[in-house]
Amino acid sequence: MLKTFKKGGVHPPENKLSAGKSIEVLPLPASVFIPVAQHIGAPATPVVGRGDVVKVGQIIAKSSSFVSTNIHSSVSGKVKKVDFQADSSGYPKQGILIDVDGDEWIEDIDRSEDLKKDFDLSGEEIVKKIQDAGIVGLGGATFPTHVKLVPPKGMKADILLINGVECEPYLTSDHRLMLEKTDEILVGIQLLMKALSVDKAVIGIENNKPDAIQRLTEKTKEYNGVSVAPLKVKYPQGGEKQLIKAVTGREVPSGALPIAVGAVVSNVGTAFAVYEAIQKNKPLFERVVTVTGKALANPSNFRVRIGTATSALVDAAGGLPEDSGKVISGGPMMGRAIASLDVPVTKGTSGILLMEKNESTREEMNTCIRCSRCVSACPMGLEPFLLMTLSEKQIFDRAEDDKIMDCIECGSCSYTCPANRPLLDYIRFGKGKVGQIIRSRKK
Amino acid sequence: MSVTVIYTIATLSIIGTSAAVILFFVARKFKVYEDPRIDEVEGSLPGANCGGCGYAGCRAFAEACVKAADLNDLNCPVGGNDTMGSVAGILGLEAVKKEARVAFIRCNGTCDHRPKTNIFDGADTCAIAASVYSGETDCQWGCLGYGDCFTACEFDAIELRADLGVPKIIDDKCVACGACVDACPKNLIELRKKFPKDRKVVVACRNQDKGGVARKACSTACIGCGKCEKECKFDAITIENNLAFIDSDKCKLCRKCVSVCPTNAITEENFPPRKIKEEKKEECSTAK
């Protein structure tokens, strides 16, 4: 029997429309807007100004603290201005607007497609290079990777988990990457293992991607210590804590990090980015993005430069369908609807989903009948109906006691609610408030 | 009468009497002295328990008044000077006259001025909408219009206006308790000095974007041009972060700033109509 996590979970329709489409390179846009805050932690500080000429791969914003990363230019051209523009968070954020002129890369980058397997770097050197290359978790949470690779004092990782689950419906970027860049990902995994000094790595893949499982299982024979764990399909298996539970059976305690149970989780996209950064000297300035939707003419997987406007991706996939209801950055479960097609692709954009009006409209909310479907669906073992009420009534001390901070915002509760209650909306709001209270207490 | 009944009555009477005697002594021994003035002060308060004074209800405020050496820092915004006068009378202290205040929503982004650029269909509260994104219009500072202030107001002093998209404060009912100020996630509501006849001259905008960006999002946004600051003879207007602010304590209601404002971001209310020469501007400000 295949492994999976125990508590909760749901089975939304998969709709992997673009699974059979190989990754295409999106043509260069005319201009890009690169936000300086594309990661969890302190925003980077711009180091270029109006009129500066930049090359592809050049640092344009430097990280100011440990939990932060550098931002590199994804195009060559002239900096038009340092400005504010709305990103997928919905609020205007600082960023650098660059007019594209040609495609000139900095000299260090090896642009060849040859596979480079060998490396003789120490763990520290690898972490340093990852930090310089601005790599963050590409699964969507955008936590700086170098921070994960330096465990807090007294803690030691014994296993590296590679997240190839891609449990979000519609999204196929990781799936395609596993099929097309198998060796690169595996070398990236070796590099991550070296950095963490662990000798075991497991790639978790849901069994709705049999081709990826087969290909990786064959290839892992050539690499020491790496194995593949096929998993039963269940959302949100791609959640860090759920994946650890499914693969190793260990449960991360409430409020703790995965390192507390000796595990570090990285996405396959991140492993690929690590390979490129170290073997090819290529900083993180492009990523694979799935552009999909039922009404879309041509759902595709694109390799996109960071900072490209969403509209360019939609146009390349056949243009905005007429009865589009929502454009979502990310997947349908955890993604955010964006308010404008000018929103740029950032390091955390795993997909652009165009939903039809009838799919995306919320139905009328009814009263809670205490059916407790949300409780059985919650993968963290919380009571979403209760947390919603507490957030609504602003009883934040009790919400904290009831572990609102453990919520991973997977949306299984809202998905499963027969009364169409916006459970996650309220819980997310409560979580924000409780987070503020906890931070102010620490000060 | 049977003996049982007599015994019963006798026993119960003895228990009752002895309990009364014990309770009498216990009550004297453990008597807590409470200033009778607390009850008196509480009686003179409005009893709204709104928390506008900063205390947890009227009783707590009454206790604070009785304990206080003077009434400088204590004020019941609901009752105003009359109530504080009677409180001072009971306590034999001197009442400090406080200027009455009134809430004002610093956003004039009605549907005509601020076109919608997207639709929000999440939970119907400002707090959640603000935690998700900047709002249905391109102005990230303005009113969201779901009425968290309306829900917070216990005095029915806020009116939701579907035709405007921005709530209105009913000055007569507003007691300046500040509940709406805390409820607004965009910090739009300010407690301003209450002028006679409810007249006011206010910058009805909180947009701190640069002029061009602000104007694009809303035709009546403050663009921070500084004309009003130059025009004001009383130093009541300051410009910070591309946004003008009129200090109601310094404002003399001369209305000169209203005439120079190029975007009509400064609104005047409850003034008699101006002379014919300026009729056009008057129309704009009442059309809001």
Image (cartoon, coloured by chain):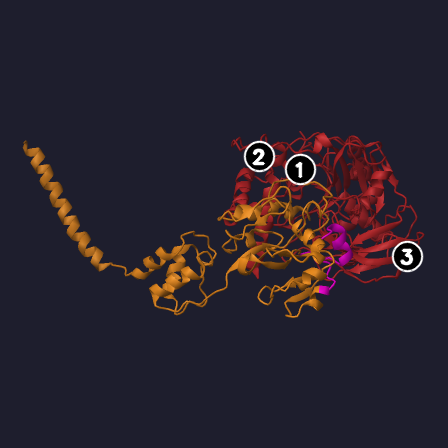
The tint of chain A in the picture is red
CA neighbours of label 1 inside 10 A, class few (<14), some (14 to 19), many (20+): many
Contact flag, marks 2 and 3 (Cβ < 8 Å): no
Cα gap from disc 2 to disc 3, whole angstroms: 51 Å
Residue A72 in the image: state x and y as whole percent: 82, 55
Name the mark on residue A106.
Answer: 3
Q: Earlier in the sequence, mark 3 or mark 1?
A: 3
Chain letter for the residue marked with disc 2 in the picture: A
The stretch of residues the image draws in magenta is B206-227
Residue A133 in the image: state x and y as whole percent: 81, 55
Q: Is residue B272 left or right of residue A144?
A: left
- The residue singled out by tag 2 in the image is A374
- The residue singled out by tag 1 in the image is A236
| Quadrant in which residue A418 is drawn | top right
Which chain has been coloured orange in this picture?
B
- Disc 2, SS: helix
